[in-house]
């Protein structure tokens, strides 16, 4: 038996004993050389077994580790402590994270923008303030059945330690939202952040752990590798105590997580299409499209990335977009921007479906894109748009820039086919502006996406202006959907035969 296995088994037994208040038979198994159990002098009852104290190496780290294996071991110890302290402690952690994310939103938004150099400060701040919309322990209502043969309870119980990977596009928000969901479900977590967004993530982890230790007495409930690498990713994924993975990012990390052999909840890439027909309110559609596509310079995975508009209303839609703050590029300006924003392999020209996005333009302000396009825009312009064909790189690539391609289509059928093709079967998010229920239904069925938003901006799909709850990890290829505390639980059934039913 490996040392880790022995330690694991000892921990589990000690934890069970702690809950039972001690048992003579089990206490013999709890440690290799048990001392006589301490007793309460008042009544002679055995005192609860103490869990091992934090190893010296893990003390005062406040969750920030150089070594992934140490981080996993510390997170495991914290998980066992959380188990002892019950649901009240989980609820307190949720409260701490929501309160600190809100209180530090301005500072943490600033340091995340400074480090990543992508997105907009106002939205970085807002994304932290809305962590309070992420659901917590109240989400875990057990499912009960009662009948002639007694009662059965299905409970949502924790996995243990979760390994989580976060993106550069919203580092602290994803980390914070993941903590709320995962700890509400009773887990601890080890993060491998994106290398270009890891310093700010470590600042938040340290602050969360300081407060958790002060108020609940648990160290290292939230762990992070200070300098994340592919090796630390592999170490987390292969560590024995890590029972579940949750990755939020593009196609490469989804593929890597699925190859680990561990269960992985994957929040993967998207390229959300928008279809606009001739029955909707074009002013409302234009405003919604601008609000969604301009958000954080179009870094959101759910953000509007390309628009297909019926030919009959395309001019009016673009007019409304111009009247509501977006700026239209002409063909030569679009051409200049395309050459700057994408790289093309030798012998391939603009319009190539396999263009790759130039990182220097991802998540940059409109002013940067406008300069590359050779156009002057007012400082308060938050979105550029241009007419393109359906195969243009701005349509086909998940470009994450505040520049929206608009493609004319002759019919709803053509628009749905083009949307399906541009979405690349990520099954992530699609949007329609229409008052025709047949158009809406046809697109919903054909696109088969995790989120489908009608007549609103994409963030409405995450409870921001629409009904629902928030998460920054939308599990698309693995099918869990918008993650919530239940996503991070094991369902366990407890059956009482013939008794305890009260009528
Ligand atoms: P990214 O894929 O470059 O990085 C995401 C994370 O994965 C980072 O921590 C990175 O270090 C890690 N990573 C990347 N390749 C890896 C590999 N081969 N092995 C191990 N780890 C690896 O993505 P990004 O630029 O940080 O974020 C943008 C992408 O994430 C977009 O595709 C966006 O759609 C997606 N995203 C999805 C959701 C969702 O909820 N579905 C949310 C946010 C972002």
Image (cartoon, rainbow, N blue to C red):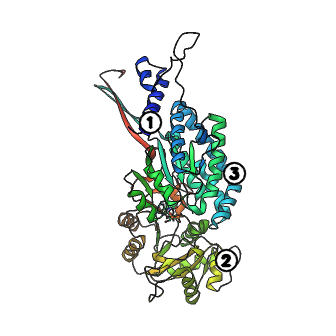
For disc 2, the marked residue is 367
Nearer the N terminus, badge 1 or badge 3?
A: 1
Question: What's the distance in space between the residues labelled 1 and 2, CA to CA?
Answer: 55 Å
User: If you read the primary sequence from the N terminus, does the residue marked by circle 2 or circle 3 appear first?
Assistant: 3
Pair 1/2: label in front: 1
The reply, left or right, for residue 21 in relation to residue 207 is left
- Relative placement, left or right, of 97 versus 181 is right
Q: Label 2 crowding class (10 Å Cα cut-off): few <14, some 14-19, many 20+? A: many
The location of residue 179, given as percent across then percent down, is 55, 47
- For the C terminus, give its image quadrant: top left
> Quick one: 466 or 200, which is closer to the camera?
200
Pointer 1: what residue? 8
Q: Is residue 409 visible?
A: yes
> Nearer the viewer's eye, disc 2 or disc 3?
3
Q: Eyeballing the image, is 134 above or below 282?
A: above
Residue at the disc numbered 3: 104
Please tell me how crowded label 1 is: few (under 14), some (14-19), or many (20+) other residues with Cα within 10 Å: some
């Amino acid at each position: 038996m490996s040392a880790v296995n022995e330690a694991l088994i000892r921990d589990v037994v000690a934890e069970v004993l702690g809950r039972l208040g001690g048992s003579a038979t089990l206490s013999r198994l709890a440690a290799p050389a048990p001392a006589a159990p301490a007793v309460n002098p008042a009544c002679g009852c055995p005192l609860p077994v103490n869990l091992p104290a934090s190893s010296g190496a893990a003390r005062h780290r406040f969750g920030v580790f150089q070594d992934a294996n140490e981080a996993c071991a510390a997170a495991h110890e914290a998980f066992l402590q959380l188990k002892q302290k019950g649901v009240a402690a989980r609820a307190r952690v949720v409260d701490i994270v929501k309160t600190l994310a809100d209180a530090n939103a301005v500072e943490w938004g600033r340091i995340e923008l400074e480090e990543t150099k992508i997105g907009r400060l106002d939205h970085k701040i807002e994304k932290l303030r809305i962590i309070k919309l992420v659901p917590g322990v109240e989400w875990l209502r057990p499912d009960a059945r009662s009948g002639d043969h007694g009662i059965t309870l299905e409970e949502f119980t924790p996995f243990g330690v979760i390994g989580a990977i976060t993106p550069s596009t919203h580092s602290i928000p994803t980390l914070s939202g993941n903590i709320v969901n995962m700890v509400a479900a009773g887990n601890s977590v080890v993060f491998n952040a994106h290398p270009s967004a890891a310093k700010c993530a470590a600042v938040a982890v340290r602050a969360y752990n300081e407060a958790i230790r002060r108020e609940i007495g648990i160290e290292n409930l939230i762990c992070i590798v200070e300098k994340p690498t592919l090796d630390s990713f592999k170490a987390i994924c292969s560590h024995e105590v890590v029972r579940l993975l949750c990755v939020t990012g593009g196609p490469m990390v989804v593929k890597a997580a699925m190859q680990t052999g561990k269960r992985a909840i994957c929040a993967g890439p998207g390229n959300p299409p928008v279809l606009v027909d001739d029955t909707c309110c074009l002013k409302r559609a234009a405003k919604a499209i601008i609000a969604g596509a301009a958000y954080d310079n179009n870094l959101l995975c759910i953000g509007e990335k390309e628009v297909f508009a019926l030919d009959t209303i395309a001019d009016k839609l673009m007019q409304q977009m111009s009247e509501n703050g977006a700026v239209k590029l002409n063909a030569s300006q679009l051409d200049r921007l395309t050459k700057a924003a994408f790289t093309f392999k030798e012998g391939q020209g603009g319009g190539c479906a396999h263009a790759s996005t130039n990182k220097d333009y991802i998540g940059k302000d409109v002013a940067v894109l406008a300069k590359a396009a050779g156009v002057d825009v007012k400082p308060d312009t938050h979105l550029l748009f241009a007419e393109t064909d359906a195969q243009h790189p701005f349509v086909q690539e998940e470009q994450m820039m505040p520049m929206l391609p608009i493609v004319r289509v002759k019919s709803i059928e053509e628009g749905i086919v083009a949307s399906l093709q541009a979405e690349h079967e990520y099954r992530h998010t699609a949007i329609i502006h229409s008052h025709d229920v047949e158009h809406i239904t046809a697109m919903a069925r054909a696109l088969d996406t995790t989120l489908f938003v009608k007549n609103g901006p994409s963030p409405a799909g995450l409870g921001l202006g629409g009904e629902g709850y928030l998460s920054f990890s939308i599990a698309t290829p693995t099918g869990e959907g918008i993650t919530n505390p239940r996503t991070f639980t094991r369902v366990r059934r407890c059956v009482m035969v013939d008794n305890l039913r009260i009528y």
